[in-house]
Image (cartoon, rainbow, N blue to C red):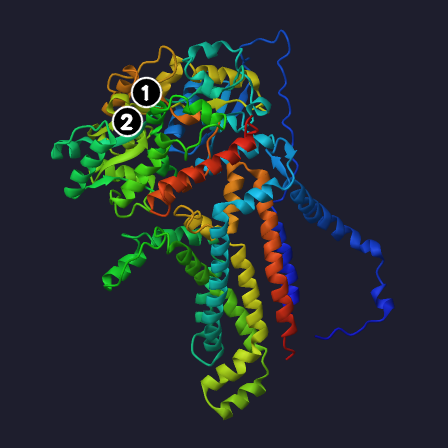
Amino acid sequence: MSNPKRPLAVLRSYPNWFYLPAGLVFAVFFVVPTVLAFYFSLTRWTLFNATFIGMENYRNFLGEPMLAAGLRNTIIYAVMTSGLKVIIALPLATLLTSRIRLTGFFRAIIFFPVLVSTVAVGITFSALMQPSVGLINTALGTLGLPTPDWLGNPRLALYSVALVDVWKGVGIAMVIFIAGILSIPTDYFEAARLEGGAWVKFRHVIIPLARNATFTVILLSFIGGLRTFDLIWTMTKGGPGFASDVLTSVIYKYYQAGFYGLSTAGNVVLFILVTIIVFPLMRYFNRLELEL
Amino acid sequence: MKIRNLLLKSIGALSVVGLLAACAPVPAAPAAEPAAGEAAAPSDAAVSLVYLVDESQPSQARAKAFVDGYMALHPNVTITIESRPGGTEGDNLVKTRLATGEMADVFWYNSGSLMQALNPAQSLVDLSGEPFIANIAESYLPTVSQGEAIFGVPGETAMGGGILYNKKVYADLGLSIPTTWEEFAANNEAILAAGITPVIQTYGDTWTSQLFVLADYYNVAQAVPTFTADFTANKAKYATTPAAVEGFKHLQEGFEKGWWQQDYATDKFDQGLQLLAEGKGAHYPMLTFALTTLAENYPEQIEDIGFFAQPGSDAALNGATIWMPAATYIPQTTSNLEVAKDFLAFIASTAGVDAQNAAVVPSGPYVIKGAVLPDDVISAVRDVAAYIDNGNAGPALEFLSPVKGPSLEQITVAVGTGQMTAEDAAAAYDADVEKQAQQLGLPGW
């Protein structure tokens, strides 16, 4: 990473009060609500009044029997979606950067789900995954394959939602990979062609040299997975029972129930959790980052 | 590609989403008292009100009947109906709009424990001094009161909570109405043997999963008469009261014995009604408000549907659990208090009842004095009325105690899908209830 030292005069060429407008916006819309959220997480809050109760909300939230399952589901969901997105998007990007017909058409097709509203995707897939008359099971049944209850089976529901998430998000991952592959100098591809065929190109050029793109995809989809809410909520509402509850759906249910202090405490916990997982990961990836 | 830049952006976005922005609540402005000497009756000046009503078909139809009836009498008043979602999403919306002073001029909402959670003394207009309160059955008033203050007027019929059943299936198989759980279980085995679904469950709409627990309350109260008071005072628990665990056990038994239909985990309320009307399912644990929708969608089959109370352990003590009507309330932020009160007076009158009867099929008895059910009332409603007339009926727990846990519907789904045992579910519900009681600041919790 290049960070040439600039002369002091350039750094100081703008007066400090130029920071003010942006700083004000940042303070009003970010700092103040954040500080208030930390405060309200220490209270029993009815929206009408707030009673200070110390760490009670955190004790309640962390002592919640469903929380352990929710945490496990969150991690499973984040790991599974970010992993699958890399595994599927990288070969797709390789294919769609090579000289085949209709690359533009296929890129558009794969990117299309990214443009659709998540809620619409959730509702559509709930209908498609309906166990006896849904399109997916009708098709599987015609082929003589087993027809699971995708969203009704407590052991399957979380994975079904994660698969839809991958379907919807793989387009973004593919675009990032395409950008990564196109930024690899063509010399390497020339060398790979002399050395061997497509496999050498994929294994020894694209995988190592598109590493930055891989890190970006993993980080973005991992953060997205940890914070996932809309798809889970529209497809299962965390159910059946608590089977596909993730942190955000637990927090939202508290909010709906009117436990405003408790749900704010849950959000603080989520914030801290994402931070302690993602920052070390980011530092690690940054150390391995390549200069091309 | 600079990961750091991308990340800084995403972390910024994340924090805003992650921390629910905590805006300080705007205190509800106190409603202006009418100046002394101002005429009590609304003047002829043009007035417009907004009426917030949940989106369910029966509520919308009733609200429209009230609005049309009232506007015909008062041409200067325009009332527009605004729809909101039902269930916990609707609870959240109502609470938030009340807290931020954004509530409609009049609104429709549950009575009982859900109303208690609205912080009524600070957010709603006290109607206890109004003459039209005298039109309402005394037994109803506690469900819309806090202390001496009365906040709402009933906008629908009372409902039975129990088992809706298909009378044709019963006739074909020669079954009789069960009064104990053993008889009910035996009927279910006979129905299952005949290739019909014994019990319909619809976990696609999670609220429908609670009936086996909630509608068992009459049986619980008969077995343990002190339960209501002790439960409210944090002295009795579901998990440690065997009669109260029964409802959860029924769900567990139904799952283990395969009483549910094939797609029970994802079917929704409407599909449950269809199965019942078409005789593909014999029983549907449900509130009788469903009869209004059934009569609308399956007019040919409505007389095939009957109602019986949820069977318990003792036939002599069996009876129906009754749900009190939802009410219409006035927030303190209403734009025209006098007209709003006059509209509520219309709802709580026999004229309001007539308007309802003309619009929808009644799903139970009214709680307005002098109101009568039409002669052609459907037979399932007569079944409910029979329990009340014979004295074998009592209100559901949520109308007797402010304590109701918000997660019951997820817990009952977990039991009904075989993920949780009845005992664990009762304990989980106790923990859920504790949070609600603390949130309400009840003494003893």
Identify the residue position indicated by label 1 in the image: B393
Q: Residue at x 54, y 25 (%)?
A: B105
Residue visible at 33% across and 43% down in the picture: B416
The x and y percentages for residue A240 are: 38, 47
- Residue A19, numbered label: none
For numbered disc 2, what is the local secondary structure?
loop
Chain holding disc 2? B
Q: Quadrant of residue B422?
A: top left
Residue A19 in percent (x, y) is at 79, 55
Relative to A124, is A134 on the left or the right? left
The reply to whether dot 2 and dot 1 touch (C-beta < 8 Å) is: yes
Judged from the image, the secondary structure of the residue bearing numbered disc 1 is strand
Residue B155 seen by the camera: yes
> How much space separates mark 2 and mark 1, taking CA atoms?
9 Å
Q: Which residue is mark 2?
A: B309
Q: Tell me the crowding category of disc 2: few under 14, some 14 to 19, or many 20 or more residues within 10 angstroms, Cα based.
A: many
The three-letter amino acid code for the residue at tag 2 is: Ala
Count of picture labels: 2
- In the image, taking residue B315 as reference, residue B174 lies left or right, namely left
The amino acid type, in three-letter code, at marker 1 is Ala
* Image position of B241 with respect to A290: above or below: above
Marked residue nearer the N-terminal end (2 or 1) = 2
Name the residue: 54% across, 36% down: A258
Q: Position of residue A203 (x, y in %)?
A: 49, 82
Quarter that holds the C terminus of chain A: bottom right
Q: Residues within 10 Å of mark 1 (few under 14, many from 20)?
A: many
**How far across and down, in percent of the image, does residue B295 sit?**
27, 30
